[in-house]
Amino acid sequence: MRLKNIKGAKEKISQSPYIIKNPEEYKGKYRTLFKKTNPIHLEIGMGKGDFIIGMAKKHPNINFIGVEKFDSVLLRATQKLENIELPNLKLIRFDATEIENVFDHEIDTIYLNFSDPWPKNRHEDRRLTSTKFLKRYDKILKNTKHIIQKTDNRHLFEYSLKSFTDYEYKIENISLNLHEDNIENVETEYEKKFVQLGYPIYMVEVKNRQNFTCKQNVLLGKLNKI
């Protein structure tokens, strides 16, 4: 369950050097915020920050931006960053529904980790892998679109696979149990809990599709066998 309504959370996060206070002002020029003009990777719905902080530590030659819409959750991330220096990390308090107002064809990779599945059909457009959101990502990703998703929710995973392929993304990598496969991984706080409970973690990496190959059918067939 997400933390909500921590008194003074908004004021406290605004004091963190990692927070971008006026993100719209940097649209199209986010590289100016970082000391090095490296690729920019974006996590949408970063939660308490375990993943984005871990990735920034592990990959100093990539610039990372985390987006979270809840002040109280983002506060936990900024608290973890106290007394830590990561020049390749910035955080934004923002709602993903307005993401195209913040970035302009400058993101190299998007991470979608354990997003809300919004299981009811009437809420489909709120899913971060819906066509509505994929169109938003078109406006912020660079020429090569690259998205990596992790989830414990089988129905959201199946929905996302169809959504990606219908939108002409090509599956580059897929796992039906990430923690049993030999794939590089930095865990989120939710992921750690799900793994302890014995839930499989699903992962898919997609890029914009140039040519449809038999690899696509092989990977989708792998899912249908379980």
Image (spheres, grey):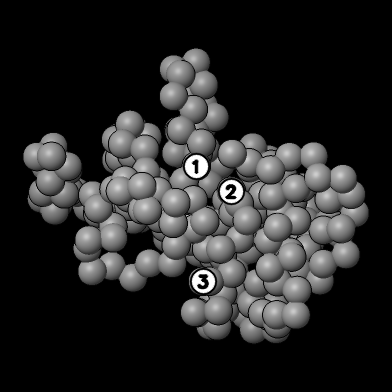
**What type is the residue that disc 1 sits on?**
Ser
Q: Disc 1 on helix, strand or loop?
A: loop
Give the residue displayed 88% in from the left and 64% down from the top: 15
Q: Position of residue 175 (x, y in %)?
A: 24, 54
Tag 2 residue: 45
Q: Which image quarter is the N terminus in?
A: top right
Give the residue displayed 75% in from the left and 80% down from the top: 83
Q: Tell me where residue 41 sits by quadrant.
A: bottom right
Q: Disc 2 on helix, strand or loop?
A: loop
Which badge, 3 or 2, comes first in the chain's sequence? 2
Tag 3 residue: 55
**Is residue 145 visible in the rendered structure shown here?**
no
Q: What's the CA distance linking mark 3 and mark 1?
A: 18 Å
Q: Position of residue 49 (x, y in %)?
A: 61, 60
In the picture, measured across the screen, residue 188 lies left or right of residue 213, that is right
**What type is the residue that disc 3 sits on?**
Met
Which badge, 3 or 1, comes first in the chain's sequence? 3
Q: Position of residue 217 (x, y in %)?
A: 13, 44
Q: Is residue 143 above or below residue 151?
A: below
**What type is the residue that disc 2 sits on?**
Gly
Q: Is residue 136 above or below residue 21?
A: above
Give the residue displayed 13% in from the left and 39% down from the top: 226
Q: Is residue 225 above or below residue 60?
A: above
Residue in the foreground of this view, choosing between 215 and 196: 196
Instruction: Tell me the tag on residue 115.
Output: 1
Question: Which residue reaches farthest top?
Answer: 122
In the picture, measured across the screen, residue 62 lies left or right of residue 211, that is right
